[in-house]
Image: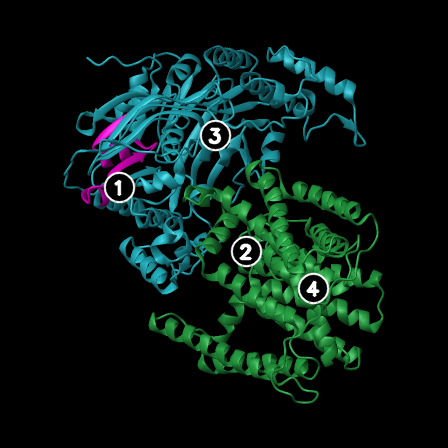
């Protein structure tokens, strides 16, 4: 049986980040005199971070392959602009536009991926070019001005909430029910994994640790649901995020394609000589990033209720920082969905908390920069110590 | 003139699990050309790295005396300071800098950090004159041929006021003409009192210029021959290089050789960058069921290039020729297809091409055959655990668990992980490139046992090795390669180390009587 200390040592990165996130949340909770954890602000926090998380999932895969995508902020803008022009100026049906946008996102990803994977041009250069190209196209499409507003249905992508099937004044009962179902599901899954591990004779964590861990997770899930239930319930975007996160967590941990992406990032030559079609895999990874960036673009446009020329400006940096804070390695082969998620939330809480405190955008950037540096320093320090 | 410029006494150098040098003593007289010969892995390069401070004082046992003084070099700059300069096989010039910039790199003619270009250029011209190279000091290295680059390296050594020049296979990549020039230069230096150590596989060259020859074998000095008075024949040198006890190093095998399982005909491959250079030249090669075929030759003779080009065109361009499995032509134009056709290639460089070092043992073992442990693209982890545990037990991989990172295993165990990966892919033909490089004797024996077991299961096996005893001890039939061509083929029963070495070394085709 694993002891607690070896468990912590093996997962020091994940636990370290989680502890940092909790510490930062407590800090802002105190500093903002409780505003941070107010139901309306928690809902806001989720909405504000939904696009960063969406893109961090794709960016994580790119970073695991050992590359980078700098263009995602501009892709957000160009997709928003396209949606704005088609829906507002040309009266297209918004559902159709969503489909077109996702396809276009895939095409943009394929464009980057082709240059990186098949023409062997470093992604830094290709996506830097993409960043300029798509920002320029955005401004051209919008003729330099904002386009809006969007129809109600489109807005609901980011500002809608799931319906409540119970009429209870001021409290969203469905949200609580979903929380309960989710908690039970999580406990059941964890229990099943544990049983499986025992069946095959692998090391498992001590039982009391298992209990404590599940109580903590359940508390967090129920707490979050309670907070959101006291406002308007679960935002539609959160449902979307949940699906995406589950999907990518599964891809990275249990699928053949995920395993190959890690192998390619860890040692491209060895992966290729083991029969992995590395250029094609890299190409697909960029297409995936394009689709997720375009999805984020739609969410941003829906949330702002207009397409603006400078939408998504600098967003690539938050996305990339989220991955690196979450423990992904710039040289590839390392990184987890849960890490990127915690990283994205850490950045989100910093943004949100400092905004509430009235810290200017200038100092927000300084703080985020320092946090990124410290997180990576922590990584390097741990690596050297274990080597 | 017997005053000794360099004396190395009782040098012993250990690597984890391997004794690379065992009590080696070696001395060079003032103003002589001393050749150092031995098989790949005999310890020549290691000895020179000890001498030049690449392996600093304290990481080896023994003493080094240079010009009568004991030296304890901490790094290569210290050894260069006393006039000991080594020129490596892979040239260490910066391609996009000029000759003059390269000559004084790290040794700039400068005052207060400002380079004196006039002095640099005129000094460069002078040095180029000394090595007989007629080039402008401003020519970029990248615009020169390898032969000229080699001369620049030597000029660089002269710039450091060299007293003892060490050349590691200086003519390996040179044509006849350039080689000739280089050897002339060494003879000239000798007249000016500069001693040299020449490491070379080309025995004809050694015979031409060397005053003494020291033979290394298995990390020990075998003998030093004096060539000044007696003529030493190449056969005499070869005998010294290979003669060793071969009993009990190879497990016995019951031979059961069947039909031809795999064959390539008229296989031609060109270099991926220098597209006019042929790296495989009309190669015909076959392997039978249950047969272990050896591919012998020097490093750079095109063995790895041939193997990788067969393995899904993983190396080279403009590949032509046909491949047959069980008599039927097979498509092996991508690695996917080659694996599909039942071919596996275990690389000579497991850290660069074989393993994902930062990942777990189990992930490495299943990488080439993830389909086997997954249903509809989803990996069945319990099954993966079970399969990889099986291979760990079968091949006796020593690891704390199959979740240990490949990084933390010893060389022999890493090699077993690479083998496991390919065994799990279920091939019929296995190409093993230097399967025992850098691993200790015990692990070697285990690898040989695995090879035997695979052969007796009816697989066709090709072993590429630079170690002749290994080729002779493990294989049923032996091919010898030189410069991209198969220059010899013989059954192991008729082969001897001398005979194979002759094919490897001789510049002319050997005419069989």
Dot 1: few (<14), some (14–19), or many (≥20) neighbours within 10 Å? Answer: many
Chain shown in cyan? B
Dot 4: few (<14), some (14–19), or many (≥20) neighbours within 10 Å? Answer: many
Q: Nearer the viewer, mark 2 or mark 3?
A: 2
Q: Nearer the viewer, mark 2 or mark 4?
A: 4
Q: In 3D space, how far apart are the residues under numbered discs 1 and 2 (Cα atoms)?
A: 34 Å
Is A69 placed left or right of B461 in the picture? right
Q: Nearer the viewer, mark 1 or mark 2?
A: 1
| Residue B460 covered by magenta stretch | yes
Q: Which residue is mark 4?
A: A154
Q: How is the model colour-coded?
A: by chain
Q: Are marks 3 and 4 on the same chain?
A: no
Compare marks 1 and 3 and give the one earlier in the sequence: 3
Q: Which mark is residue A334?
A: 2
Q: Secondary structure at mark 4?
A: helix
Q: Which residue is mark 3?
A: B7
Q: Nearer the viewer, mark 1 or mark 3?
A: 1
Chain shown in green? A
Over which residues does the magenta segment extend? B454-479
In this picture, is A219 found above or below B162? below
Name the foreground residue: B322 vs A93. Answer: A93
Question: Disc 3: which chain?
Answer: B
């Amino acid at each position: 049986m694993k002891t607690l200390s070896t468990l912590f040592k093996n997962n020091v990165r994940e636990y370290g980040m989680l502890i940092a996130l909790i510490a930062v949340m407590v800090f802002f909770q105190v500093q903002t005199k409780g505003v941070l954890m107010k139901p309306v602000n928690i809902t806001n926090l989720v909405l504000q971070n939904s696009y960063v998380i969406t893109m961090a999932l794709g960016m994580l895969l790119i970073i695991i392959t050992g590359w980078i995508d700098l263009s995602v902020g501009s892709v957000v803008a160009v997709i928003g602009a396209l949606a704005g022009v088609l829906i507002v100026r040309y009266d297209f049906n918004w559902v159709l536009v969503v489909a077109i946008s996702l396809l276009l996102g895939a095409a943009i990803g394929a464009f980057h991926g082709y240059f990186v994977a098949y023409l062997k041009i470093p992604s830094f250069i290709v996506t830097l070019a993409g960043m300029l190209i798509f920002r320029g196209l955005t401004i051209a499409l919008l003729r330099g001005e904002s386009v809006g507003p969007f129809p109600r249905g489109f807005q609901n992508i980011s500002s809608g909430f799931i319906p409540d099937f119970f009429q209870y004044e001021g409290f969203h009962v469905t949200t609580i029910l979903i929380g309960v179902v989710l908690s039970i599901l999580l406990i059941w899954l964890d229990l099943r994994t544990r049983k499986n591990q025992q069946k095959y004779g692998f090391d498992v964590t001590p039982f009391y640790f298992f209990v404590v861990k599940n109580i903590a997770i359940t508390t967090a899930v129920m707490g979050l649901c309670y907070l959101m239930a006291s406002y308007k319930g679960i935002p539609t975007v959160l449902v979307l995020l949940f699906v995406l996160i589950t999907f990518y967590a599964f891809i990275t941990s249990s699928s053949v394609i995920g395993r190959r992406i890690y192998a390619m990032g860890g040692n491209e030559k060895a992966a290729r000589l083991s029969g992995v079609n590395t250029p094609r895999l890299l190409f697909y990874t960029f297409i995936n990033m394009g689709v997720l960036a375009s999805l984020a673009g739609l969410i941003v446009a829906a949330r702002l209720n207009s397409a603006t020329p400078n939408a998504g400006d600098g967003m690539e940096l938050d996305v990339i920082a989220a991955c690196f804070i979450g423990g992904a390695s710039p040289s590839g082969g390392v990184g987890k969905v849960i890490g990127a998620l915690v990283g994205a939330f850490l950045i989100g809480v910093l943004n949100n908390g400092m905004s509430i405190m009235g810290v200017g955008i200038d100092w927000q950037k300084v703080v985020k920069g320092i946090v990124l540096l410290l997180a990576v320093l922590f990584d390097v320090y741990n690596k050297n110590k274990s080597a | 003139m017997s005053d000794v410029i360099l004396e190395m006494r009782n040098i012993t150098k250990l690597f984890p699990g391997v004794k690379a040098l065992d009590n080696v003593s070696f001395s060079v007289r003032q103003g002589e050309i001393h050749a150092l010969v031995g098989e790949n892995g005999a310890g020549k390069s290691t000895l020179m790295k000890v001498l030049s401070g690449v392996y600093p004082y304290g990481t080896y046992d023994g003493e080094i005396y240079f010009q009568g003084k004991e030296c304890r070099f901490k790094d290569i700059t210290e050894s260069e300071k006393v006039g000991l300069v080594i020129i490596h096989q892979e040239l260490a010039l910066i391609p996009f800098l000029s000759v003059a910039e390269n000559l004084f790199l790290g040794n700039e003619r400068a005052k207060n950090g400002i380079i004196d270009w006039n002095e640099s250029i005129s000094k460069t011209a002078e040095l180029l004159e000394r090595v007989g190279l007629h080039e402008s000091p401003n020519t970029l290295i990248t615009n020169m041929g390898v032969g000229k680059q080699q001369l620049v390296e030597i000029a660089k050594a002269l710039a450091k006021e060299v007293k003892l020049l060490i050349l590691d296979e200086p003519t390996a990549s040179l044509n006849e003409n350039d080689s000739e020039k280089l050897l002339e230069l060494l003879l000239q230096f000798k007249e000016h009192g500069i001693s040299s150590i020449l490491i070379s596989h080309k025995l004809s060259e050694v015979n031409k210029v060397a005053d003494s020859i020291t033979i290394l074998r298995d990390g020990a000095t075998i003998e030093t021959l004096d060539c000044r008075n007696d003529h030493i024949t190449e056969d005499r040198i070869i005998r010294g290089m290979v003669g060793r006890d071969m009993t009990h190093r190879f497990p016995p095998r019951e031979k059961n050789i069947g039909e031809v399982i795999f064959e390539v005909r008229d296989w031609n491959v060109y270099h991926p960058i220098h597209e006019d250079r042929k790296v495989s030249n009309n190669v015909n090669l076959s392997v039978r069921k249950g047969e272990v075929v050896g591919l012998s030759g020097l490093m750079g003779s095109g063995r790895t290039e041939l193997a990788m080009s067969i393995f899904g065109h993983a190396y080279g361009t403009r590949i032509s020729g046909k491949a047959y499995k069980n008599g039927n032509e097979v498509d092996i134009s991508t690695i996917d297809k080659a694996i599909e056709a039942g071919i596996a290639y275990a690389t000579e460089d497991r850290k660069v091409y074989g393993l994902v070092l930062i990942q777990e043992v189990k992930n490495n073992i299943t990488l080439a055959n993830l389909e086997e442990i997954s249903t509809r693209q989803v990996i069945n982890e319990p099954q993966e655990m079970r399969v990889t545990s099986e291979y760990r037990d079968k091949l006796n991989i020593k690891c704390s668990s199959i979740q240990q990172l490949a990084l933390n295993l010893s060389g022999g165990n890493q090699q077993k992980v690479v083998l496991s990966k390919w065994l799990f892919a279920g091939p019929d033909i296995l190409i093993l490139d230097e399967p025992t490089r850098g691993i200790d004797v015990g692990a070697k024996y285990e690898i040989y046992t695995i090879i035997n077991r695979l052969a007796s299961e009816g697989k066709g096996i090709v072993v590429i090795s630079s170690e002749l005893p290994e080729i002779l001890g493990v294989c049923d039939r032996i091919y010898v390669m030189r410069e991209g061509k198969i220059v010899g083929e013989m059954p192991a029963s008729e082969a001897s180390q001398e005979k194979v070495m002759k094919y490897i070394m001789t510049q002319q085709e050997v005419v069989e009587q």
